[in-house]
Image (spheres, grey):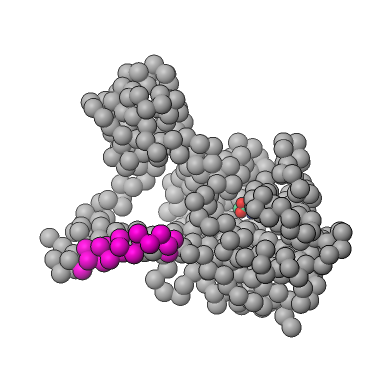
Amino acid sequence: MPHSRALQDALRKVQDAAQADSTGSGQAHVDFLEAIRKLNLASETPAETLMRMRFEPLQSAAIRIALEAGIFAALDEAQGRSMTATLLATKTGYDALLIARIMRLVTCVGVADEVGENTYTANDMTRLINQPGLSGGEKHHFDLFFPIGARLVEYMHRTGVHQFPKDDSELSPFRYAHNGMHFFEYFDKTPEQRKYLDDYMAVRRVGLATWFETFPMAQTLCPGTKTDQDEVLLVDVGGSWGHELAAFARAHPDAHGRLILQDLPKVIEKVKGEAPPASVECMAYDFFTAQPVKGARAYYFRNICHDWQDSICEQILVNTAQSMERGYSRILIDEYVLPDTSAPIRGSSMDFLMMMFCSGIERTKRQWESLLDRCGLEIVRVWRTRSDYEQIIEAQLKE
Ligand SMILES: C[S@@+](CC[C@H](N)C(=O)[O-])C[C@H]1O[C@@H](n2cnc3c(N)ncnc32)[C@H](O)[C@@H]1O
C-alpha cells in the first residue's frame, strides 16, 4: 500500500485546493487539478502508476476510432436518448461487437456514459468532442503524433535525437515519421489536416480569459495610439483564420486603428474565399521576409515562436522588430512562460510536443529574455493569465 502519511497529506491538499477553487480563480482551478493528480499518484503503488500510464495511449486510440466511425456524432444526434451497440452499428456501418469494445474503454474515460449493457448516451464531453474544433484537436494530435511514436526508438538509433536540427540533413522526429516533410509543408500537402489544425486553433482556449483581457489592450495601448486615419492598431502575425482579431474587434468595436491579419498566401487565400472576419484586413505575408507593416502599435504573435528553434525564431522576430517604431510599437507574444522548477504538466507536455512536431520549444522567462535580447527587444512586462497556461509577453525595442 502507498505510504499512508503521504496519502493523507495529498488528500488534505485536495480538500484545501477544492475550497480555493470555489472562489472561481483560474489559477486555483489549475492548482486543484494538480492536487488531484498528486493524490492519484499517492494512492497508487509505483507499479500501478506505470501500468496506468502504459495503457493511456489506448484511450486515445479508442477515442480516435469512435470519432472516425461517427459513434460520437450518432450519440449526439440522439439528443439524450440512449443507443445500443446494435443501433450504433446500424447507424455507422461498423460491427456491434467492435462498437461495444470501443465504448467499454471510451465510457471508462468519461467521453460518453454507459447506461446499461451495451447501451450508451452522450454526455457533455461527447457533445464537445463532436464539434469541429475539439474533434479537429483530437485528429491533429493523434494523426500527427502516433506515427512519430511508432518510429521513435528506430529514429533514436538510426539518426540520434535532433532537438534543433542544424540543417535539412538532420531529421526531426516529425520529419523522420512523415516522409521527410517539415511540419508546415505537411499541412500544405494534407488540406484536411490543415483544417483540423485551424479548427482546433480557433477553440483551443475556449473558457479561458482572452489575450486582450489578460493584457488590457484597450486600457494600455489603445489610448496612446496615433489618431491618423491609416494607423495600424494590431497586426496578427501568423494569425490563421483571424479569430483573435475578430474577437478583439467584437469586444472593442470603437478601438481606433486598422486590424491586419497576416499568414501564408495559401491560408489568406482560403480565409478570403470564406467569410473573412468583418473589419479585419487580410494580408499574405511570409514571416521570413521583412515585415511590410511599419510602425504598428502592436504586433501579436500567438503560438508562433514555440514552433521554431531559437536561430529561426530570431529571424521571424527581427523581421518584425525592424519595422517597429522605438518607444511606440510593441510585440505581444502569447505563449507559455515556463517556471524554472515544478513546471505544470500542460506546459511540460506542450514543450515535448513542440520538440516532436516542429523542433520548437516552450521557453522559460530566462530563455525568452535571452532570445528577445538577441533580436534587439526587451520585455516590458509579462502579463500573467489567471491560470497557469499561456501568458502575454509585452516587449519593445531596446532603449
Ligand atoms: C500554430 S499556428 C498558430 C495560429 C494562430 N496564431 C493561433 O494561435 O491560433 C501557426 C501559424 O503560423 C502560420 N505560418 C507558418 N509559417 C509561416 C510563415 N512562414 N509566414 C507566415 N505565417 C506562417 C501557419 O500558417 C499557422 O497559421
Residue 176 against residue 58 in the figure, above or below: below
Q: Is residue 275 magenta?
A: no
Within the image, what quadrant is residue 43 found in?
A: bottom left
**Does residue 353 appear to the left or right of 243 in the view shown?**
left
Question: Is 314 situated above or below 67?
Answer: below
Predominant SS of the magenta segment: helix
Q: Nearer the viewer, residue 334 or 248?
A: 248
Per the rendered image, the range of residues in magenta is 9-27
Q: Is residue 80 left or right of residue 44?
A: right
**Point 52% across, 49% down: residue:** 206
Q: Describe residue 187's horizontal placement relative to residue 342 as left or right.
A: right
Residue 125 percent location from the top left of the image: 40, 40
Q: Residue furthest top?
A: 90
Residue at 67% across, 46% down: 241
Q: Please identify the residue farthest to the bottom as the structure is shown.
A: 399
Quadrant in the picture for the N terminus: bottom left
> Which of these two is toward me, 40 or 295?
295
Percent coordinates x, y for residue 359 in the rendering: 57, 60
Residue at the image position 73 percent from the left and 76 percent from the top: 397
Q: Is residue 287 above or below residue 75?
A: below
Closer to the camera, 192 or 254? 254
The residue lying at 55 percent from left, 46 percent from top is 203
